[in-house]
């Protein structure tokens, strides 16, 4: 079941949270130079590699960048690996950026949506072919609600909420 309450960002991918740290959104998306919380989700070879929209909205930009194929569980993969950066404009709230990143084994990113298209939260937007990563940038007022090591389910697990009164989660998964 995909949560549809306003103000939520849901996971665009199955996998495990490997990083939660401030980072500047990809420069190719023209979203400024201010660091925002970035949630990195690593997809191992056994995870489903279908990517989904983290929020409902209009796809404002999709930018492909050639790159290397280092281990996607490492933060340096976000900068150096082949990737597809996407910017969504939701009906309410700030723009959201998320990036599909090819990994050590992955050699192909397939996008099945186009710029200007209206997307529903949880809708399929493409796939990454094996051993990859998805980074989600959560601008204020979004508060990340996941912990390192937590398992994500694409289109179901809530990553962040802009309407919550809770502090960011701390801790780790066992």
Image (cartoon, rainbow, N blue to C red):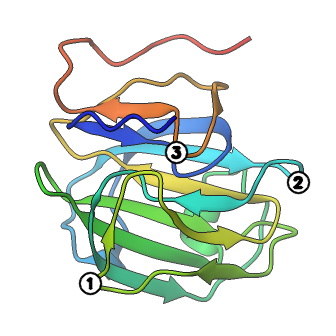
- Answer left or right for 104 relative to 2: right
Marks 2 & 1, CB-CB < 8 Å contact: no
Q: Nearer the viewer, mark 2 or mark 1?
A: 1
- Answer left or right for 19 relative to 54: right
Q: Which residue is mark 2?
A: 45
Q: Label 2 vs label 1: CA separation?
A: 32 Å
Q: Which quadrant of the view contains residue 77?
A: bottom right
Q: Label 1 vs label 3: CA separation?
A: 21 Å
- Answer left or right for 65 relative to 98: right
In-front residue for pair 37/89: 89
Q: Which residue is mark 1?
A: 116
The tag on residue 154 is: none
Looking at the image, can residue 76 be seen? no
Circle nearer the N terminus (2, 3): 2
Looking at the image, can residue 163 be seen? yes
Dividing the image into 4 quarters, which one contains the C terminus? top right
Q: Is residue 34 above or below residue 20?
A: below
Q: Label 2 vs label 3: CA separation?
A: 19 Å
Q: Residue furthest front?
A: 1
Marks 1 & 3, CB-CB < 8 Å contact: no
In-front residue for pair 138/161: 161
Instruction: Give SS at disc 3.
Output: loop
In percent of width and height, residue 9 lies at 35, 41
In percent of width and height, residue 6 lies at 20, 37
Q: Which residue is mark 3?
A: 155
The structure residue drawn at horizontal position 67% and vertical position 61%, both measured from the top left corner, is 50
Q: Is residue 73 above or below residue 114?
A: above
The structure residue drawn at horizontal position 33% and vertical position 52%, both measured from the top left corner, is 55
Circle nearer the N terminus (1, 3): 1
- Answer left or right for 164 relative to 136: left
In percent of width and height, residue 23 lies at 37, 51
């Amino acid at each position: 079941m995909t949560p549809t309450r306003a103000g939520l960002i849901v996971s665009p991918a199955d996998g495990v949270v490997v990083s939660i740290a401030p980072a500047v959104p990809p420069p190719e998306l023209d979203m400024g130079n201010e660091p925002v919380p970035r949630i990195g989700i690593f997809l191992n070879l056994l995870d489903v590699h279908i990517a989904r929209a983290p929020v409902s909205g209009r796809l404002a930009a999709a930018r492909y960048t050639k790159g290397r194929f280092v281990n996607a569980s490492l933060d340096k993969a976000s900068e150096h690996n082949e990737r597809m950066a996407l910017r969504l404009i939701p009906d309410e709230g700030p723009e959201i950026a998320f990036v599909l990143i090819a990994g050590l084994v992955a050699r192909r990113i397939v996008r099945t949506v186009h710029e200007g298209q209206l997307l529903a939260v949880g809708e399929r937007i493409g796939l990454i072919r094996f051993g990859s990563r998805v980074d989600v940038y959560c601008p204020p007022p979004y508060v990340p609600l996941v912990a390192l090591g937590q398992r994500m389910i694409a289109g179901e697990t809530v990553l962040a909420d802009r309407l919550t009164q809770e502090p960011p989660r701390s801790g780790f998964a066992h």
